[in-house]
Amino acid sequence: MSQEQLHEEIIARSEATTWALARQEWGLKNIWMSDTAQTCLCGPHPIKEICEIENQVNGATTEVGNCCVNHFLGMNSEQFFTSVRKVRADGEASFNEATIEFAHGLGIITDWERGFYLDIWRKRVLSPKQLNRKRQINEKMMKHFLR
């Protein structure tokens, strides 16, 4: 992984001409996990946890790996991937609050689904109806986060 290469690629897609200013232009737009490895901007290493980032100044978008987003750009995408991995392993597990809010912000889940999930996500015992609805929301979110 080449930090220098990542810096060059991000600066080239930014309005700013220095790393310190260029990195401030970018925000996390979307995340997903892929079964097919892609290549990160930092170099030829395979990535399966993809972060789409967007330049808030010029609207440019690009994809980088989860590690680069966390270590070099300072965006906390790991909290989302941890939650997705957990639900992927157990369809009855709960997404964390940050991932629920992120999915709602992306329009993956409705206001009602967000409110319902936030009401039940920490409960240990759910009624059969609640558990069924939670599974449906989990499936809906996982369709987006797994590609």
Image (cartoon, rainbow, N blue to C red):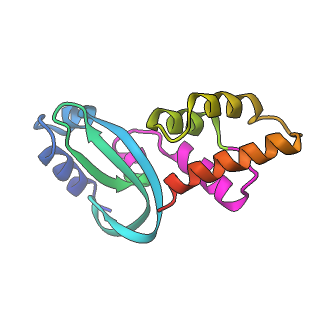
Q: Position of residue 58 (x, y in %)?
A: 16, 35
Near-viewer residue (86 or 1) = 86
Q: Quadrant of the N terminus?
A: bottom left
Res. 117 image quadrant: top right
| Residue at x 20%, y 31% (from the top left corner) | 21
The residue that appears at 39% across and 38% down in the rendered structure is 74
Inspect the magenta stretch and tell me whether residue 78 lies in it.
yes
In this rendering, does residue 65 appear at all? yes
* Image coordinates for residue 101, horizontal then vertical, percent: 55, 32
**Residue at x 31% of width, y 54% of height:** 63
Membership of 102 in magenta stretch: no
What is the number of callouts on the image? Answer: 0
- Name the image quarter holding residue 72: top left
At a point 50% along the width and 52% down the height, the residue shown is 144
Residue 70 vs residue 115: left or right?
left
Left or right of 127: which side holds 22?
left
Q: What stretch is highlighted in magenta?
A: 69-94
Vertical side of 86 occupied by 115: above or below: above
